[in-house]
Amino acid sequence: MINKLQNAIDSANKIVFFSGAGMSTASGIPDFRSATGLYKNTYRAEEMLSHTFFEYYPEDFFEFYKEKMLYPEAKPNYAHEFIAKLQDYKDVSVVTQNIDGLHQAAGSKKVFELHGSVLRNYCTRCHKFFDLDYIINSDGIPKCDKCGSIIKPDVVLYEEGLDEDVINGAVRAIASADLLVVCGTSLVVYPAAGFIRYFRGDNLAIVNRDATSYDSECDIVIHDDLVNTFKQLKIRD
């Protein structure tokens, strides 16, 4: 299957990589739904990452958020870097469910962050921008140093909708791609997982450690570690 994926990359002009939490595990960021993931080890994680919990229990929200969702020391791994380098030779877009900003840190230019980013934070009243360091170094609930209001991470919480501009950009990229490579996601989170339905290209590939319910619909299926898989691929003109 590696050879088949290599041939698909070589022959494609427009490629979209659709990435999930498995893309960043080699960077030291835990995934969510595997046997050792965040949701297995933390009770009520989905509730604590909901808009309602943020509104009514902000102190508990930020205690959980800072401890479990922020990894400021994380660096892009080989898979991130491969995708970024490939854009020198191909029209490459990234649609990601991740909120860690590692695709951009690796150098990827066209990135559609379906669930936002921990790197961006805004005052809920005056909309002043704050970086990740401000959130990490704040005591308790982060407050705006201009108006004193609570700061909210630019992350899509449960009960919140996805950004329309991001949705439209992601759909256009997927619909016009020759090759769609799904990387490190179990494809169980909707509406994000439903985006692959817009693909009309030549090859649909999935690279994931575990089997998914979409495997039977893919042209290329590789069950392996992402970094190991990408290290077997070559970038060609």
Image (spheres, helix red, strand yellow):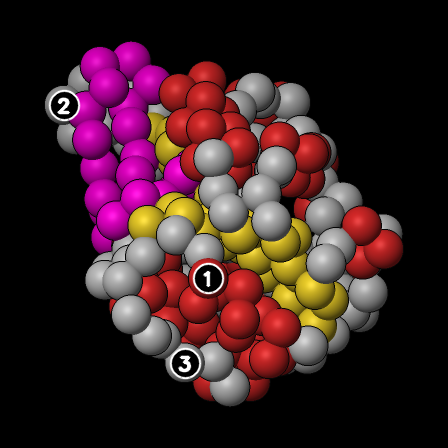
Image coordinates of residue 69 in percent, x first then y, are 50, 54
* Mark 2 residue crowding within 10 angstroms, few (<14) / some (14–19) / many (20+): few
Residue sitting at x 39%, y 52% = 13
Residue ranking furthest to the front: 11
The amino acid pointed to by label 2 is Lys
Q: Which residue is mark 2?
A: 146
Lower sequence index among marks 2 and 3: 2
Question: Quick one: 100 or 1, which is closer to the camera?
Answer: 1
Q: What residue does disc 1 label?
A: 11
Task: Tell which circle, 2 or 1, labels the residue nearer the N-terminal end.
Answer: 1
Q: Secondary structure at mark 2?
A: loop
Q: Which residues are magenta?
A: 109-135
| Residue 222 drawn at (x, y percent) | 70, 72
The quarter of the image holding the N terminus is bottom right
Q: Viewed as shown, does residue 223 lie left or right of 67?
A: right
Residue count near mark 1 (Cα–Cα under 10 Å), binned few <14, some 14–19, many ≥20: some
Question: Which residue is under mark 3?
Answer: 234
- Indicate which label's residue lies in the foreground, 3 or 1: 1
Taking the magenta stretch, the answer to whether it contains residue 9 is no
Q: Quadrant of residue 234?
A: bottom left
Q: Nearer the viewer, mark 2 or mark 1?
A: 1
Which residue is pictured at 20% across the width and 31% down the height? 129
Q: CA distance from mark 2 to mark 1?
A: 53 Å
Q: Residue at x 65, y 53 (%)?
A: 204
